[in-house]
Image (cartoon, rainbow, N blue to C red):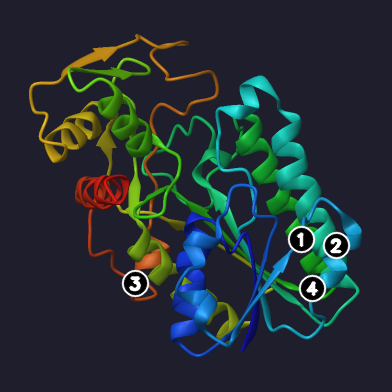
Amino acid sequence: MKVIVTGGAGFIGSHLVDALLKRGDEVIVFDNLRTGTLENLREAIQNRKLKLVKGDLKQPAETQLLPDDASFVFHLAANPEVRVGQVDPSVHFNENLLATFNLLEKMRRSRVSTIVFASTSTVYGEASTLPTPEDYGPMLPISSYGASKLGCEALISSYAYTHNMCGLILRLGNCVGRRSGHGVIHDFIQKLQINPKELEILGDGSQNKSYVHIDDCIAAILVTSEQCVARQNRMDVYNLSSPDQVSVKRIAEIVAEEMQLPNAKLRFTGGVDGGRGWFGDVKLMHLSVDKLLKLGWQPKLNSEQAIRTAARELIADSRK
């Protein structure tokens, strides 16, 4: 197939590009290269089936650079840093909602009728049901990031039903692994490289969430998108993560162990609003992935194993 990957030079996007090229697809990467990097596409860019288009979805005119005859759009372009919304909520409005609207408008005017959207577990807010299923409600996000992603879901649904499109929503847990340039593991590694004796941990350490390794994440994206093609449902939604949790305190211990700093002191800041790392940080997140498991997908790593594997990969990358 000919497919478009927005944000294809980013962390998850570049891994998806690799997988799509491996199965023989023609791939158009659309990225403004502000957070994504050409280094992430170092191997993929050698493939003649890859075309890189530098463009910004926030600019309607630049969406015209996208082809009109692609089979699929994998929409991964976004600002992935949840915390930035505490300082400047407009970032998430522009990078998520505005960008998604402009992309959908381009699709409406072309023959591209299927979109796979990388949403987030933060759309659920402080869910009272754990593990949280896809039909949980009402969804009340506590961050501008989660709110903007939920808004994107609503936009995609409205276009699917109004303009004869198909939408697949993937609500991702915390995805970790090589090429990741943000997140808790990345932050902990950087802090320990600066001060090997002490690791500052935002919050009280009891934050407990679902994590998924990038390889398992990409496998799930492929499985669900194939089902999207086969079923041609107007809209479908899947949670995507490992079926368990791991605490921030345990993540800190694993990173220290992998950096061979088992005696590093863990210093908790205490956090805000009941021990959160920052305002808008969902303290407890545990996704139900029963619906995804029924498709035959099975993660190779649980949350703690995903953290340890990702820590090893990111530590190795930092030493190159």
Distance between the Cα atoms at labels 4 and 2?
8 Å
Q: Position of residue 45 (x, y in %)?
A: 54, 76
Task: Tell me the residue that label 3 is attached to.
Answer: 297
Labels 3 and 4: the sequence-earlier one = 4
Labels 3 and 1: the sequence-earlier one = 1
Asked whether, in this view, residue 316 is left or right of residue 156, the answer is left
Q: Position of residue 312 (x, y in %)?
A: 21, 49
* Residue type, numbered disc 3: Trp
Task: Tell me the residue that label 2 is attached to.
Answer: 62
Residue at 49% over, 29% down: 126
Distance between the Cα atoms at labels 2 and 3?
36 Å
Above or below for 98 versus 45: above
Q: SS for tag 4?
A: loop
Pick whichever, 184 or 167, lies toward us. Answer: 184
Q: Are marks 1 and 4 in contact (CB under 8 Å)?
A: yes
* Residue type, numbered disc 4: Leu
Residue at 45% over, 66% down: 15
